[in-house]
Amino acid sequence: MLIYDIILAGYINYKEENMQVKFKAFTLYSVRRFIMVSVAAFVMALNINTFVNAGEIVPGGFTGLALLIQECFRKFFNIQIPFSVLLYVLNAVPAVVCFKFVGKRFTIFSCIMVFLTGILTDCMPPMFIEYIRVHDTLLSAVFGGLINAVSVSMCLFADATSGGTDFIAIFISEKYGKDAWNYIFVGNCVILIFAASLFSLEKALYSIIFQFATTMVLGSLYKGYQKKTLFIITSKPDEIYPLIRDTTRHDATAFKGVGMFRNSEKTMLYSVVSATEDERLIGAIKQIDPDVFINILKTDHIQGRFYKQPKD
């Protein structure tokens, strides 16, 4: 009985220590996410108050729609509606849907981003804004798009989004397994056409430059949505496949062949992984087989089952 009590006490202590370690790691991770989201909100609010407003640019998504509605009320009805109010109203329904179907903590941190962006945009000191603002439309479009991409990337690295159309795109992707970004692009085009008809074609064209700069820089900074195809020619497939499976949770297909130079049996493992996983995976594969040959291709589109880590 005494031995049983000692074993039970040791097991309980082990579980408590393990839970404390997990709780500490979770807390640090949450703090890091909050800091990154807060900085991203500040950067986005600063960008809206400087480059976007100075160039009279209409960004994509709900941010651009909120700014467009705000400008319409100011120009045609002489009514000043706070940007934060419009942003919160537009994001309300998509946020509720994502909270229910995508992930609770993911949605909460995204809502923190939206909330802080709205408040900071409306409350940023005018003197601070005028000191940074650039009174050149082309410079505003290019550098505003670049800064916007930095802000959005910080959100994505914090496992959150800047809200708006990202909520819609991620919900459709998680729920139905379909890519909604083409539809989002069409929606942005409609917003720009509406802006061109109400104000000027010139501002709409500069807004396209803004969105193009955002897309190009975002694609370079964040690769979470990109995929890579790996053709791995090795003599140690039984050791490398478990590494692929355990590291990335993706599968692989083996093809038997012969290395013609040395007339030796080889196996080609074919696998598709996330672009954020390929470098770490390739380094681990080289440790197992220093003579491995790997061909890496960029993958634009795939059909079939592909593991996606669920949102928390």
Image (spheres, rainbow, N blue to C red):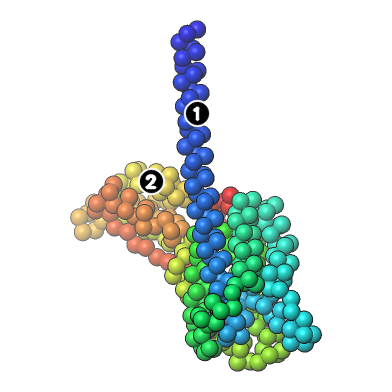
The answer to whether residue 26 is left or right of residue 78 is: left
Q: Residue 236, percent across and down?
A: 30, 46
CA distance separating discs 2 and 1: 28 Å
Give the crowd class for mark 1: few <14, some 14-19, many >=20 residues within 10 Å: few
Q: Which mark is residue 15?
A: 1
- Viewer-proximal residue among 44 and 235: 44
The answer to whether residue 136 is left or right of residue 255 is: right
Image point 68% across, 69% down: which residue? 84
Q: Residue 20, percent across and down?
A: 50, 35
Splitting the image into 4 quarters, where does residue 304 fall?
A: bottom right
SS assignment at label 2 = helix
Q: Label 2 is placed on what type of residue?
A: Leu
Q: Residue 35, percent across and down?
A: 51, 57
Q: Label 1 is placed on what type of residue?
A: Lys
- Viewer-proximal residue among 267 and 116: 116
Image point 64% across, 67% down: which residue? 119
